[in-house]
Amino acid sequence: YGGQWDIAEAAKKLTADLAMLKQKGLTNEMYKAREEKRKEGRKAGLKGKDLLAHIVDGAPAEEVELFATHDETIKAFEKTVASLLTDEQMEALPGKSQKKMKMMMKEKRSKGGKGSKGGKGKRKKKAAEEADSSDQ
């Protein structure tokens, strides 16, 4: 199995994508400012969407878009790496990394097909709404 080469290819793509973002204007100062806002938000007890809103607050739309692309690029790379790791390699990872990689694997498997979110639940909800409107 040529997993080593697949990871090398993914790393090359990541490097090229990040270089492109730097050409579009993403700077080290922007990274530092974003990290400061993140630390600030965490100290204030913010998490998830609230933390993201705090980080984005006051940033120019162009910068927000660059970081959104940056985050998508990193996430795609992590998904690729997670899918290439063997069970032994996964077990050898530190706890936090292992948890993140396993989460990426679940995410990759759950996209589309039977059993994905938004399946029969929508039909049941719609049928319930129609039943409620017909009762009135």
Image (cartoon, rainbow, N blue to C red):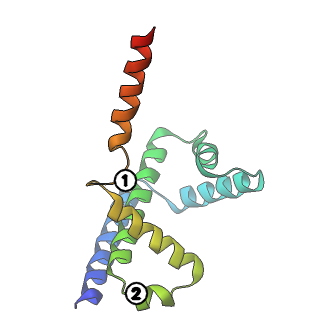
Residue lying farthest top? 136
Residue 127 position in % (x across, y down): 36, 27
Q: How crowded is mark 1: few (under 14 residues within 10 Å), some or many (20 or more)?
A: few
Q: Residue furthest right?
A: 44
The disc at residue 87 is: 2
Q: Quadrant of the N terminus?
A: bottom left
Would you place residue 75 above or below residue 93 in this image?
Answer: above
Which residue is label 1 attached to?
24
Report helix, strand or loop for mark 2: helix
Going from the N terminus, do you reach mark 2 or mark 1 first? Answer: 1
In the image shown, does 28 or 82 lie closer to the viewer? 82
Q: Position of residue 121 (x, y in %)?
A: 38, 40
Name the residue furthest front.
135
Q: Tag on residue 1?
A: none
* Distance in Å between CA atoms under marks 2 and 1: 38 Å
Can you say whether 94 is above or below 118 in the image? below
Q: Answer above or below: position of 92 versus 33.
A: below
Crowd around label 2: few <14 · some 14–19 · many ≥20 (10 Å): few
Q: Nearer the viewer, residue 135 or 106?
A: 135
